[in-house]
Amino acid sequence: MSSASQHSRSGLNLPHVLVIGFTGHRQLPDENRSRAAIRQVLAEWKTRDPGAICGLSSAASGADLLFAETCLELNLPLRIFLPMPSEQFRHDFDQPAWERAEHVVQAALSAEVIGAGAEPVERYYETGIETVQQSQLLIALWDGGPSQGLGGTADMVDFALKLARPLIWIHSGTGEVRYFNDNPKLLRDPELDFLNGLPAPAADLPSNTPYELVQSWLVKVDENASRLAPQFRRLAAIPILCTAAAAILSGRSSFTGGAIFWLWLGTALGIMAAGLPYLMRLNRRQIAWTRARTAAEVCRSFLALWRTPALYDAVGPETLPELAGMLHSLNFLKLLNRASVRTSLEEFKRDYRRERVQHQIAYFDRHAGHAARQIRKYRIFVAVSVCLGVALNILILMNAHGLSHSIPLRWHPVLALVATAGFQLATVAGALLFVYDYQRRRERYRDLHRMLVQWDKQLELSQTWPIVLRTTSLVEKALLAELIEWRSLIRHRKVPDK
């Protein structure tokens, strides 16, 4: 089944994307045999239908150029990494080879200059390393011998194997194909499957262009995260309330005597408080919410930078390895839509400051104020409850020691119960304050508000894309930092796949 037909049946789903990188020799003993071997391997992966395949390589003469041309022949999207700008790069080619390379660069989804070293050999090495790092699968056309200098094919193969990157070795002399670190997960991504499988919104959302698809997918994941989050906080408070009620009802039997019904009810509530976290699957709910919320916020961050000239790198697979498939998919869709996302620096700054930075400044200011008000309410409630309990206990003690006879004896158990209830309510309020995390949230909101105000000023004054992109990267990393931390805490406790 083609990826297009699969997408039409699955609704608001991001496509699974497999990035196949390449490294190989410049001098080949038999170019035609090498081209045929590369074509056979790529054609085989196309038939496995991972969703979408994107080729990634340099356009250097020799094997790299063969791989790039084969991707175009098979209608595979292609990214090109250049070790240096084209004006310098062309000096490494004769005229016929340069014409081939120029055609490949022009036909590719993108051509990015990667090398930054002082010497050409360093730039080629950096380009090769970046190719390995951004690939999920590496094809190497290699004779098995050592590198002739820094950044040779042997160095790239060694680097990939030590990173446990899946590798296909095509022997450049014999054409033999060998597989290393084979990984069946290349065809499917469990986390992207989970996110794609979340319930779709009730309303029909547009998905005709890559940008519309990503926007609509964000709405789906965000709605699911919002649906899960309030339930978790409310349900987490239920065991606390049950425990306090159990203590008060049990205390009623102890202090006032009477029907055994209250004692049984208190015991039942105590058992319920102990069992509710398991029955309600609180841990499972928290994990599901964290997964959906992290994906939604990363996608929101991605869309905020959609119109920049660079691919998204504020958060990468090395930071959130579980979301590597989602990030590959989002960047792939942005590349497909690159022609329609061009914008001027001033337009991007205006829109980004208004829709992202200033919106978040207002958000954090509003929520910091809300958290501060909630803290005051809980603290007042705790203080009143404790004072009530202390006052009643003192009154009962004075009466017991003959210092006061204003309380009839029959009321002593009732007052003792009310005093105990006061202390229990104070404890409940303190526990709920902890559950809702208002104090930490207030300080976090204030810190983010302060940082965003400063970065907003920097964006307003910045006049070049590199400075603007550096500042936006700081903004996005700060906004996502806490979610990334929460995500890391549950990295090894995922919801089992159904």
Image: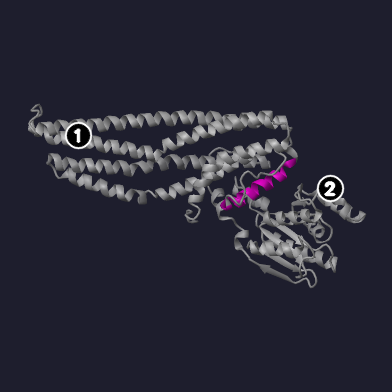
| Residue 315 on image: x %, y % | 61, 45
Of helix, strand and loop, which mostly describes the magenta segment?
helix
In the image, residue 365 sits, relative to residue 50, either above or below, namely above
Residue at horizontal 84%, vertical 51%? 89
Determine the image quadrant of residue 451.
top right
Tell me, yes or no, whether the two marked residues, 2 and 1, touch with CB atoms within 8 Å: no
Determine the image quadrant of residue 184.
bottom right
In the image, residue 284 sits, relative to residue 457, either above or below, namely below
The numbered mark at residue 48 is none
Kind of residue sitting beneath label 1:
Val
Q: Can you see residue 102?
A: no
The numbered mark at residue 86 is 2
In the image, residue 404 sits, relative to residue 13, either above or below, namely above
Left or right of 278 on screen, residue 445: right
Residue at horizontal 75%, vertical 70%? 144
| Residue 79 on image: x %, y % | 75, 51
Q: Residue furthest right?
A: 95
| Residue 432 on image: x %, y % | 35, 38
Left or right of 329 on screen, residue 264: left
Compute the Cα span from label 2 to label 1.
82 Å
Residue at horizontal 25%, vertical 41%? 245
* Residue in front for this viewpoint, 148 or 299: 148
Check disc 1 and report its element: helix, strand or loop: helix
* Residue in front for this viewpoint, 378 or 51: 378
- Highlighted magenta segment, given as a residue range: 321-338
Callout 1: 10 Å neighbours few (<14), some, many (20+)?
A: many
The numbered mark at residue 418 is 1
* Residue in front for this viewpoint, 446 or 2: 446
